[in-house]
Image: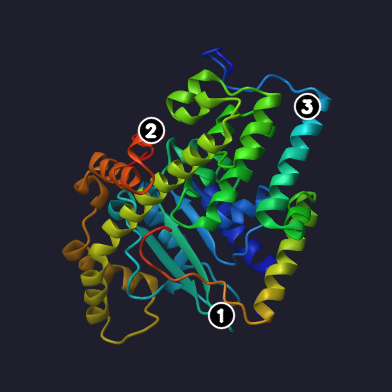
Amino acid sequence: MNTDPSASSIPPLTAAQRRRLGRIMRDFHRRAFGEELARINFLPEAQRKLAVAEMIDHARRNGVKLTRPALGVTL
Amino acid sequence: MIPYAELEDFFSSLVATAQERGIACAITSGMACVHFGVAATTKDCDVLCDAAKSEDFRELIAVTGLRGLLPTYRGNISPPLDARWMQGGWTSHFTWKTKPEDTCLDIFGIAPRGSSPWHQELRGIYAAPNVVAEMKRTNRDKDWPFATALGGQMLDEGNVNGWLHLYDLEVLRLWSKQVAPPESLAGSRPLLRLVPFADTLRVKRLLLAERVFWSELDELRVKIYQKHLRSYTAAVRGASAGRRNLAIAESHELRLECALAHLPTQPLRDYGMERMILEAKTNVGVTVGPDVLEWLPVAENHFYGL
């Protein structure tokens, strides 16, 4: 464990560390969300939002109800 | 059907306009997750709004049209968008009666499980990943991967607080091989003392205990609010006398009267946060085991604003 009590940010990462960490998160996204959503999640912002919009609209066109019930409290 | 891109533009524009008018507010939950790179299938919008600015925000919403339609309060259950109830953690619901499905907006003044002032760490029109991740510690299984994904992203941006949001053993173990978590965070999350997380069965069990703990707390929170909503909803139904689609201003006055009679402004404070935490811990002790209690995260700081 990093014992520096003032540590509030991570020390600058090397390019190799960054690549390894990127791989860790990509693997996690695949396990947690599936291959297709993981692919979408790592697209650049504009493409990602477009892909999510297409996915949501496709689901709605096919009858999937995405509206949550109003409960008076935040879930 | 209104395309998602149009809905996203609509809500983004609403929040941007509110911010320009000095109303601290931010998109959170699903739409924020999409923005931060974690795809979520939602078409409605959740917005955090400074409770003190509830009136200004309500007035803005009331005149904001979507395809020529003005919004109404959603159903009889929605509490009024009023500072007193927003400060107590209630959620107000609004809807635009679009076809074939309504377009819905949920507004809350307090971020559930928030540990910091959300309005001081905005990312443009979005709440910060830290806030969104804390809100994802719910009693729904599907939310937890979102917290981990956001935590990973925070770490990637150099924010050590990302360690507080990782709920996946492999991610914890592999990240700690690259960068160790600072000791100071173990005060909030004792599990981090187990770095490098090599005792996998023990870490798995404690991760489970953490999730059960937050889940129990969330369940208690929801029950405390819902207990009061039955009589309030009946009162709003009676006062509306079958008049559906009342304009927001008219419906608001009616809801205020009903809320004054039936909705306590601070139900969680009335119940007691320490009592909630104690009950959640007791339940974890029964379901997971008493030995894990000392490893549970510190929840006392996660009622910011209440």
Kind of element beneath mark 2: loop
Q: Nearer the viewer, residue B295 or A55?
A: B295
Q: Which residue is mark 2?
A: B298
Instruction: Check the image and tell me how it is coloured.
Output: rainbow
* B43 and A40: which is toward the camera: A40
Quadrant where the image shows the C terminus of chain B? top left
User: Looking at the picture, how far across and down is residue B233, in whole percent?
Assistant: 27, 73
Could you tell whether B92 is left or right of A51 in the image?
A: left
Alpha carbon distance from label 3 to label 1: 47 Å
Query: Where does the image place residue B24, in percent across and percent down from the top left?
Result: 48, 45
Which of the pair B244/B266 is nearer the observer? B266
Question: Which chain does the numbered disc 3 sit on?
Answer: A
> Subunit of mark 2?
B
In terms of sequence position, does the residue under pointer 1 or pointer 2 come before the other?
Answer: 1
Question: How many numbered circles does the render carry?
Answer: 3
Q: In this rendering, which labeled residue sits more in front, label 1 or label 2?
A: 2
Q: Secondary structure at mark 3?
A: helix
Crowd rating for badge 2 (residues with CA inside 10 Å; few <14, some 14–19, many 20+): some
Using the numbered discs, state the Cα–Cα distance from disc 3 to disc 2 in whole angstroms.
31 Å
Q: Nearer the viewer, mark 3 or mark 1?
A: 3
The residue labelled by disc 1 is B101
Marks 3 and 1 share the same chain:
no
Name the residue carrying label 3. Answer: A17
| Name of the residue lying farthest toward the bottom | B242
How far, Cα to Cα, is label 1 from label 2?
41 Å
Instruction: Establish if B245 lies above or below B39.
Output: below
